[in-house]
């Protein structure tokens, strides 16, 4: 099923939407303990159109750093990048709640800085919520934004924006101190009013414990099937990369299919098998041509 009928005789860029009621933040919050929430990242309008009918939440993740821009980490991502991709995903979706990542450096300084950045993101994109990384240290900011009409999804565990402090992308919660810290983070962001929390790259028992303990839905990535939902980076699950984290399941082999299509195209161009009469324009035959 698709929410779109795309009229290619006019423009690929202006599809005819079949509007559905977009999921709201309260609806997502209420999904705790019900059917698991389905969340995927999206960075472009066309991908949003394809994913929208199947998802509850589309995340415009700052993972676009590596996935779209070939950057080494999420650190260099700017507000402008998030706004441009966020607006495209909102334009391409009618059903899913769209959540946009706040980039590194746009919110950590103070709740006021976070409000300025988050309100800019919501105004520029039309999205309904933002996501930010951090637990206890971000609780005050989450409460500040939530009280001022900006729904916040939190992100704890393996937080990629903190790669320089964490020293890499390894799983969290292996020792007692880390486990206790993760639980404190989860309780703090829940009490601060986060409407959901991404729990990334943590040992499974702590993901299960957090999901049972806190009131908002947990969305797992490298966490546990017991979370209240799951998220994956779209290009990872489509098989666009050879190397992916061990928590990724590849649901397709798109890079293989794209390579095969490109190789076939190259062969057809070089052998002049493409274009054929089907793909070329011929003069109309008639009296004026005589
Ligand atoms: O940036 C991102 O894609 C994310 C997900 C991995 C949760 O934060």
Image (cartoon, rainbow, N blue to C red):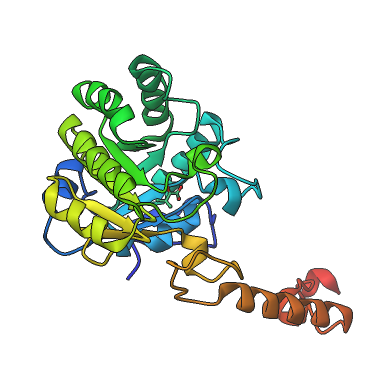
Q: Quadrant of residue 171?
A: bottom left
Q: How many marks?
A: 0
Residue 38 visible here: no
- Give how far across and how far down residue 85 sits, in percent: 50, 42
Residue in the picture at 44% in, 75% down: 251
Residue in the picture at 51% in, 30% down: 79
Q: Residue furthest top?
A: 112
Q: Is residue 210 above or below residue 155?
A: below
Q: Which one is in front, 247 or 203?
A: 203
- Give how far across and how far down residue 119 sits, in percent: 36, 24
Q: Which one is in front, 134 or 100?
A: 134
Q: Is residue 149 left or right of residue 269?
A: left
Q: Is residue 71 left or right of residue 34?
A: right
Q: Which one is in front, 89 or 34?
A: 34
Residue in the picture at 58% in, 45% down: 65
- Give how far across and how far down residue 107 sits, in percent: 42, 25
Q: Is residue 29 left or right of residue 156?
A: left
Residue 36 visible here: yes
Considering the image in quadrants, where does the N terminus appear?
bottom left
Q: Quadrant of residue 40?
A: bottom left
Considering the image in quadrants, where does the C terminus appear?
bottom right
Q: Which one is in front, 85 or 194?
A: 194
């Amino acid at each position: 099923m698709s929410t779109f009928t795309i009229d290619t005789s006019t423009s690929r860029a202006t599809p005819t939407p079949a509007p559905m009621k977009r999921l709201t933040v309260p609806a997502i919050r209420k999904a705790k303990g019900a059917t698991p929430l389905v969340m995927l990242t999206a960075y472009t309008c066309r991908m949003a159109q394809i994913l929208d009918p199947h998802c509850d939440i589309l995340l415009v993740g700052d993972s676009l750093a590596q996935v779209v821009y070939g950057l080494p980490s999420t650190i260099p991502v700017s507000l402008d990048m998030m706004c441009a991709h966020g607006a495209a995903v909102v334009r391409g979706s009618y059903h899913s709640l769209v959540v946009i990542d706040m980039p590194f450096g746009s919110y950590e300084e103070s709740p006021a800085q976070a409000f300025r950045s988050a309100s800019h993101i919501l105004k520029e994109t039309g999205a309904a919520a933002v996501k930010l990384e951090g637990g206890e240290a971000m609780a005050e900011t989450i409460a500040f934004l939530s009280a001022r009409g900006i729904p916040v999804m939190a992100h704890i565990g393996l937080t990629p924006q903190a790669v320089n402090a964490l020293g890499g992308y390894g799983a969290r919660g292996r020792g007692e101190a880390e486990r206790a810290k993760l639980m404190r983070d989860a309780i703090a962001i829940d009490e601060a009013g986060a409407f959901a929390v991404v729990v990334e790259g943590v040992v499974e028992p702590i993901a299960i414990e957090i999901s049972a303990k806190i009131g908002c839905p947990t969305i797992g990535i490298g966490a546990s099937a017991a979370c209240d939902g799951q998220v994956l980076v779209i290009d990872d699950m489509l098989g666009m990369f050879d190397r992916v984290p061990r928590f990724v399941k590849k649901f397709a082999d798109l890079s293989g299919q794209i390579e095969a299509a490109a190789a076939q195209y190259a062969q057809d161009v070089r052998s002049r098998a493409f274009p054929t009469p089907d793909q070329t324009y011929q003069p109309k035959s008639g009296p004026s041509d005589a």
